Image (cartoon, rainbow, N blue to C red):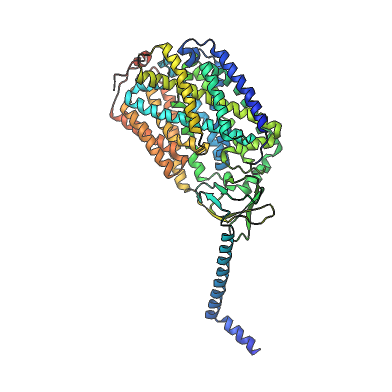
Amino acid sequence: MIRALNIDRIFLEPQTLYSTYFILMFIKNLIFILLTLTVESTFADKKLSITPDISNEGYFTLNWKQLESFSPPYIIQTSKDIDFRKVIREISTTNPNQVHLSGFEDGKYYIRLLNAQKNQITNSVELIVKHQNLSHAFILFFIGLLLFIILITLIIRFNLGLGRPE
Amino acid sequence: MNEIQLSPSTAYLILLFFGIGWIAFGWWLGKRNRTIDDFMLAGRNVGLALASTTAMATWITSNTTLVAPQLTYQFGIWGMVGYSMAALGLIFFAPMANRIKQLMPSGYTCGDFIRVRYGKLAWYVFLFVSFFYGLGWLVSLGMAGGILLQALSGLDYHIGMTIILFICVSYTLLGGLKAVIATDYIQTLIILAGVVFIGYVCWQNVGLETIYKNVSIQQPQLLNLLFPAAIMFLFNNIFFGIGEIFHSNVWWSRAFAFRVGIGKRAYLMAGLLWLPIPIITGFVALAANTLGIYPSSPDMVGPLVAAKLLGSVGAIFVFMVVFSALASSLDSLLAATSDLLTEDVYRGILFPDSSQEKLFKVSKYILLGLGITTWLLCLPRLTTLGELLNFTGAFVASTIWPVVFGLYRNRLHGSYAAIAMASGTALGLIAYFTVGFYVAALVSCLVSLIVCGIGLWLKNADFDWQLLKKLEKNHVS
């Protein structure tokens, strides 16, 4: 009882709590880094690449190579977590080495390729979607609208005024 | 590639059938071509039905059948609507076609107009813009041929591109503008029937509700009306389309070729009929992910969806529609660009005293050379169709205001027209590389208007319209 109380006391002390949390986080990150490195080295020769890696339009092209040992279909998984805890999009493709995807909203995404048995066969890539500034888009929109109105007005006026002195 | 629906042997058979058909038709139509007017301008006597269909068929091209779905796949609703607004180019050109015919009853090319109206400096700038655009469009069409065959039948890109270029160059060479216009008429019927049928099948088989639901989950940004890049794209595409038509000899040569008074009605009718076509072809692209189609290149999305929807028999149908769309534009562009090279470069710059007979022969060699150049440029598949086309947007949008002011006002001086085109193009290209392809035409158009406005304010050229009627050298500049 005393020991238990002591332990509670020790663990409930803010300083101890912080340091324990810190240690646990450090261990978790270390494991994660080691796992990532292992995964990356495992798939180092099965490169998945993305163009562009920062998209201002929400579309991009995924390209993969050296997958001779795995035949299509491939499964493309997209997640917002680097460890793919929650997959937000999963598609199947028979394309041999490339796919063009579109319609992504702002955010950071991670993408990887799996074989038909859902085993990861490439590294994962990071995609950042940052759409153009909306206010800039509206400025250009209204410039376009203004030019358009000027053009229509001039063409109508010029045609109606044909034969009259300029 | 997703699913190949046609066997290569079927694709070869279709190409053989169309190839022999079009080339024989071109040869038959070309038998009565005696003069340069017959070859370049179909005798200047084209009636309303042929005039409307040739304008429409030429504007339905790889842009409409391949790039409109691509832009819808990338920009969603705005991509589709924005693309259909390219019809405004045809509609606005309608009154200008009559004005062109009235001002230059014996004109041959748009280069003639710029040379006489604005003088040599503006003419050189305009020729540069026009050739760059013409070549860009030709290459995009050649590439589209290769992409089409690859997407539908798995044939190598280079083989498909070579065959399509060969067929189009052959019948244009044999029949001139007559062959172009006559084949356009038949191609329009095939395209219209095909596009409407594919759109209907997509609507019936997949359903609007399913498409909406899937796109909102898988590609939510495509349904966002506040999609910034797509908003930027909207007016950019409108001015790109207007610039393409206002400056290009494809449309000017038709204005010269149509019977007096026909141009306005023909272009207006063609524009109104063209307007819904990109909506249909674009809508089809929205069904791609629902059907499990994820294209390797965005410009393949249209044919892939259509082929998937219609199956292997339908793929033959799709193949014929897209092939017709490509051929109807490729032949027109080959004819119009070779006219520009013959009239403006060969006669205008190199050999001013050439006889009509000599020009008749030279125009055929030029057409052949143009076909070979296009083939060489298509060999390395450098970029996507959408990007290639929009690169030329910076060039063509700079010509809108010089053409409009030049046709209707005698005040704008040639030096300002030249500066407007050069500076518009330069700044448009800077915008292309710094912001994106979807702003190049808009920036170019804005800069060109500002320069033209300054020119109109500072100087009065007081151009004599009679010079255009006589096609004399411009003595004003």
Residue at 47% across / 27% down in the picture? B245
* Residue A54 vs residue A51, the one in the foreground: A51
> Which quarter shows the C terminus of chain B?
top left
Q: Decide if residue B53 is in sight here.
A: yes
Residue at 30% across / 23% down in the picture? B461
Q: Decide if residue B96 is in sight here.
A: no
> Which quarter shows the N terminus of chain B?
top right
Horizontal arrangement in the rendering, residue B117 relative to residue B158 (left or right)? left
* Rendered view: B41 above or below B7: above
Q: Position of residue B97 (x, y in %)?
A: 46, 20
Q: Residue furthest bottom?
A: A2
The picture quadrant where one finds residue B429 is top left
* Rendered view: A112 above or below B54: below
Q: Position of residue A41 (x, y in %)?
A: 56, 60
Q: Position of residue B464 (x, y in %)?
A: 32, 17
Horizontal arrangement in the rendering, residue B145 relative to residue B354 (left or right)? right
Picture mark count:
0
The picture quadrant where one finds residue B79 is top right
The picture quadrant where one finds residue B326 is top right
